[in-house]
Amino acid sequence: WCFVNNPKMPVFPIISLKSEVREYLKSVFLNKELLAAVGHQEAEQRFERLLACLSHPPSHTCVRASTHLAPLDEIRQRLREELKKQQLCSSSAEVPVEIVPHPCIPDVLLLPVDGPRPVQQLQSGVVVGALCGSAVLRGAHVYAPGIVASPKFMKAGDVVSVFSDIDGRCTRGATSFQGHKVFVGNGVAEMDRAAIFCTKEPLKGVGVRMTEPLYQSPSFDGVLPNLAFLQNLPSVVVGHVLGPCLGERVLDICAAPGGKTCHIASLMKDQGEVVALDKIRNKIERVRQNAQMLQLQSIKVFCFDGVKAVSSDTEKLKETDGPPFPPESFDRVLLDAPCSGLGQRPNMANTWSLKEICSYQPLQRKLFQAAVSLLKKGGVLVYSTCTVTLAENEEQVAWALKTFPYLTLQPQEPHIGAEGMPGAGLSPEQLRLLQRFSPELSWEQTQANTPLPDRASTDTIGFFIAKFLKT
């Protein structure tokens, strides 16, 4: 699989899914309402384009600038200087890195991803896990823990091809692998094979430094960590849609790893209180680290299950300023819900069963109930996911409007994605108030010479946003 003339031709096979999951997704994209709206042929093509684009990276890297610490133009200039230094230290030809602000989002900088590039596979190859392979496609080097196989006599300094093990079948420590793998580029080994597979020490550091990635984008490892925060564009849009104001009390009910939490605090200029909850302890530590790195003092972090975050036991509540909280404690609530993650890109394989894919809806509803209860009257609730199913997106909106008659859908600003997808019984007016980032709508239609900001708003991960007012 290697077509390099047209940047929108598939380089990789479509995402590998279990047949039951593929059929389920197909039924979502060929639902009666959508068929009536766009016709069978267009609906079928959208589904096929979705499967193709999910296995490929977006055509840009999105950086959220810490505009609470420095003006956007200053961050842009410093980033340009840092990336120039990075080029000087590598063997790559010096081409000025294009860094452009997003026309609608005041704290976003966009960098183009160059690819797929005509890179020649080598005889000698390293095999990495699927997550590591996806990271390489988005500009990362190969970190040692991601390596699962390498040539028998590999030494530091050897030039090797890097392959991603799509199905997770490669045995750790193997010297070769003939299974389902895809080529993601070439690099230089930074470690001997023995240092990767014959050590009892915890593995860390770069195992292969990428010199010829199939998709070229700058590595942000250690680059302005407090000023330039890598974040998918729709995830930045969420913070702006929530629209937090100075002095407010805001809850991020499923906060880890904290990108959106920190963005909310930044938008409030660190004046107010942002409460971050997550029930997994090592994940909540990431939120603390990110808040510290971005110099945000207004964030309070608690390891707590969001489902249990509301309580009316007044005696218990007096004992602590942490969760659980009394009803109507927050001006705004963000519920970036745990989800099936089927909008993430690049993702060449998903090994989940249909039962796992469909397991999130009940949890999302429990979290939603807690979020609504914790929201003040007149407050704003934003619900978001990084998946493409109706059950976790538009169907949840329909359920919420029926279950909580005092919730009303609100216009979103900015609204740069598509409207909601028909199929959940929502009216055309309601669908227009939703924001669904649907990369399949523009896949194969966007030309390489299309201006970067125009590409960036459509060629994203799959994502969904709904904004409610509690009246």
Image: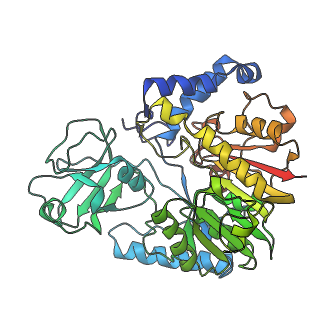
To which quarter of the image does residue 442 belong?
top right
Q: As rendered, which of 18 and 155 lies closer to the eye?
A: 18
How far across and how far down the image is residue 204, in percent?
28, 68
Furthest-front residue in this view: 315
Q: Residue at x 74, y 67 (%)?
A: 250
Residue 96 in the image: x percent, y percent? 50, 69
Q: Is residue 158 above or below residue 356?
A: below
Q: Position of residue 334 (x, y in %)?
A: 70, 58
Q: Nearer the viewer, residue 84 or 71?
A: 71
Q: Quarter of the image holding residue 288?
A: bottom right
The color scheme shown is rainbow
Picture quadrant where residue 282 is located: bottom left
Quarter of the rendering occupied by the N terminus: top left
- Left or right of 382: which side holds 48? left
Q: Is residue 457 visible?
A: yes
Q: In this rendering, would 353 be left or right of 65?
A: left
Spot occupied by residue 212 in the image (x, y as percentages of width and height): 33, 57
Camera-nearest residue between 87 and 466: 466
Q: Is residue 331 left or right of residue 292?
A: right
* Residue found at x 41% / y 55%: 135
Q: Is residue 6 visible?
A: no
Q: Nearer the viewer, residue 225 or 332?
A: 332
Q: How many marks?
A: 0
Q: Who's the residue at 71% across and 61% down the image?
A: 239
Q: Residue furthest left?
A: 153
